[in-house]
Amino acid sequence: MSSGTWVSVGPLRLALLSALAPHVRDLAVAGHDQNCVGLLLFVDSQAGPGAEVLQRIIPAIEMHNAAQPASSTAVRRAILIYEAPSAEAGEINDKGHLNQRLALARRTTLVARLFNPFPDAQVLRFDDPISIPTEVPR
């Protein structure tokens, strides 16, 4: 993070995947040189309509943040992605795991939106005040 705080991405990612299952297929933790942790959430194609997904994801992240309030563990921003990571582009390795670095590098525009000081309506914010998107991405 920009403060010099180290984020232990592996354990954080696993905890969040567990908390967000089965609605989130995978996720990438972002926040390098930023002042907070953000997530790119790869929504499972069978998760249901966007509004239902939000009703499940938002409380799960809020519960995670209540239990893990430190700046290196609390999620402050997230954006939903309704397409699976690309194996052809190398985002999924031979063992079937997300190559987080490549997933973030391929989605620099989404990462920029995630950390924009004035985020758009599709960015979930988990700080005061919480703003829930008015539009559900599809």
Image: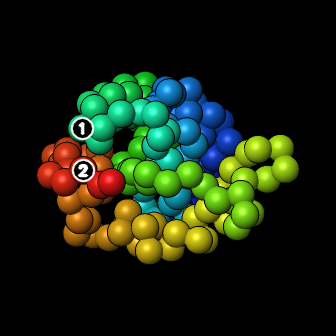
Q: Residue 82: x and y, percent?
A: 43, 51
Report the side of 44 relative to 135 (left or right). right
Measure the C-alpha gap from mark 2 to mark 1.
7 Å
Residue 107 seen in render: yes
Among the 4 quarters of the image, the one containing residue 8? top right
Q: Residue 43: x and y, percent?
A: 46, 43
Q: Earlier in the sequence, mark 2 or mark 1?
A: 1
> How did the renderer colour the structure?
rainbow
In this rendering, is residue 128 above or below 22?
below
Among the 4 quarters of the image, the one containing residue 95? top right
Report the side of 78 relative to 18 (left or right). left
- Looking at this rendering, what residue extends furthest in the right direction? 94
Quarter of the picture containing the C terminus is bottom left
- Residue at 49% over, 39% down: 44
Mark on residue 43? none
Mark 1 highlights which residue?
51
Kind of residue at badge 2: Val
- Residue at 50% over, 27% down: 22
In this rendering, is residue 107 above or below 122?
below
The secondary element bearing badge 2 is classed as loop
- Residue at 33% over, 28% down: 56
Judge the density around disc 2: few (<14), some (14-19), many (≥20) Cα neighbours within 10 Å: some
Report the side of 37 relative to 9 (left or right). left
Report the side of 74 relative to 1 (left or right). left
Judge the density around disc 1: few (<14), some (14-19), many (≥20) Cα neighbours within 10 Å: few
Q: Are marks 2 and 1 in contact (CB under 8 Å)?
A: yes
In this rendering, is residue 78 above or below 60?
below
Residue 66 seen in render: no
- Residue at 68% over, 42% down: 10
Mark on residue 136? 2
